[in-house]
Image (cartoon, rainbow, N blue to C red):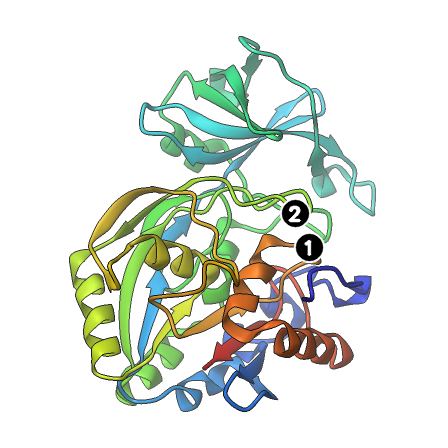
């Protein structure tokens, strides 16, 4: 199975496609079909013609928060996930200069510091109190003020070293964003535009929403995703079951959608469901509610590659990633996308 591979640095997308002179729906789209093992190349705006009338596209309506707060003294805090009791999972990051050395190019890197009961002063007079470790990287913590309004005023979007500069939060929102709550963008849906959505609907493709608020994605190699809150509403559950019973296909727009739908399966049916999911989709667990997947291109050793292997199988997935590298596809949240069809 293709879990580890070499990603050439020149294939990392450093800026949004619009900054590269490419429309959102003009990014490249790699399409693979499990039935025949074909791999073909398209633009994202071709998506409506690649799906069938009666297909159901399930999208994530989460909104991306400006979830990074720069605390000063070389420290940044990434707010990952809200907990039911009002605490948050956060990640402490060390600030360093970007390639140009300019202050505005400061980026954050993992920071193993912190201790229980530590109080971190943040801009605007807020204080963050670390309560306890939550896994190897995150802390359970409490902010002295309401978190989301605070982030909307003082936060900036999370970015990593491959992104060349800070971008406004609008660059990290999708056309489906309705409910702010994700630390990082559900990037598979970024290329959707109103014209693409209109074309999908006009061709008879159904669209239904669910919510999964994604936490930080800065995971170590072989590290599973952290638990995340999700909500599969009754109307979406009914549509999934209806389409599949009628012989149609359910296409997930993003790995977050797969995670939520697979969590909501009960005795072969998707049921309305909300809560926290720790479910990790692998070839061993299989997929029970989803037939196809639209997703980005994932880093070597990412847990997402195991999910993709559950759809495509190791041989076809290997061919896809070899084709993406050979053909110069771009990785990460501002890069190109991959449609896995049955």
Relative vertical location of residue 193 with respect to residue 274 in this rendering, above or below = below
Residue 177 appears in the picture as rendered? no
Mark 1 surroundings: few (<14), some (14-19) or many (≥20) residues within 10 A: some
| Residue drawn where x is 55% and y is 79% of the image | 26
| Residue drawn where x is 42% and y is 37% of the image | 152
Q: CA distance from mark 1 to mark 2?
A: 6 Å
Relative vertical location of residue 143 with respect to residue 105 in this rendering, above or below = above
Q: Return the disc, 1 or 2, that comes first in the chain's sequence.
A: 2
Question: Residue 96: percent from the left, percent from the top?
Answer: 77, 34
Which residue position is annotated with label 2? 222
**Is 215 situated left or right of 257 in this image?**
right
SS label for mark 2: loop
Q: Image quarter for residue 271?
A: bottom left
Q: Quadrant of the N terminus?
A: bottom right
SS label for mark 1: loop
Question: Residue 103: percent from the left, percent from the top?
Answer: 74, 37
Q: Quadrant of the C terminus?
A: bottom left
Residue 301's disc is 1
Asked if the residues shown at circle 1 and circle 2 are in contact, with their CB atoms under 8 angstroms apart, the answer is yes
Question: Residue 284: percent from the left, percent from the top?
Answer: 51, 60
In-front residue for pair 268/236: 268
């Amino acid at each position: 199975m293709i879990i580890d591979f070499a990603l050439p640095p020149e294939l990392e997308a450093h800026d949004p496609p619009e900054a590269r002179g490419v429309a959102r729906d003009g990014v490249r789209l790699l399409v693979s079909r499990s039935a025949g093992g074909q791999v073909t190349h398209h633009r994202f705006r071709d998506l409506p013609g690649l799906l069938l009338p009666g297909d159901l596209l399930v999208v994530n309506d989460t909104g991306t928060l400006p979830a990074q707060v720069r605390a000063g003294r070389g420290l940044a805090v990434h707010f990952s996930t809200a907990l039911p009791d009002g605490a948050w999972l956060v990640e402490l990051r060390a600030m360093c200069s970007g390639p140009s050395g300019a202050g505005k190019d400061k980026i954050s890197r993992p920071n193993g510091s912190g201790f229980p009961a530590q109080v971190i002063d943040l801009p605007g007079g807020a204080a963050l109190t670390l309560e306890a470790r939550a896994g190897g990287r995150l802390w359970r913590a409490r902010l002295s003020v309401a978190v989301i309004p605070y982030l909307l005023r003082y936060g900036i979007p999370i970015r990593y070293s491959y992104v060349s500069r800070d971008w406004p939060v609008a660059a990290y929102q999708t056309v489906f964003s309705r409910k702010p709550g994700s630390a990082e963008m559900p990037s598979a849906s970024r290329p959707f535009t109103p014209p693409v959505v209109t074309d999908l609907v006009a061709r008879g493709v159904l669209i239904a929403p669910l919510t999964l608020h994604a936490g930080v994605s800065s995971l170590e190699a072989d590290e599973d995703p952290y638990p995340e809150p999700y909500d599969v509403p009754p109307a979406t559950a009914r549509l999934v079951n209806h389409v599949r019973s009628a012989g149609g296909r359910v296409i997930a727009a993003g790995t977050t959608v797969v995670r939520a739908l697979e969590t909501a399966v009960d005795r072969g049916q998707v049921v309305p469901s909300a809560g926290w999911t720790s479910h990790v989709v692998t070839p061993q667990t299989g997929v029970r509610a989803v037939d196809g997947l639209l997703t980005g291109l994932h880093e070597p050793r990412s847990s997402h590659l195991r999910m993709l292997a559950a759809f495509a199988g190791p041989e076809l997935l290997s061919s896809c990633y070899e084709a993406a590298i050979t053909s110069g596809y771009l990785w990460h949240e501002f890069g190109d996308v991959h449609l896995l069809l049955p």
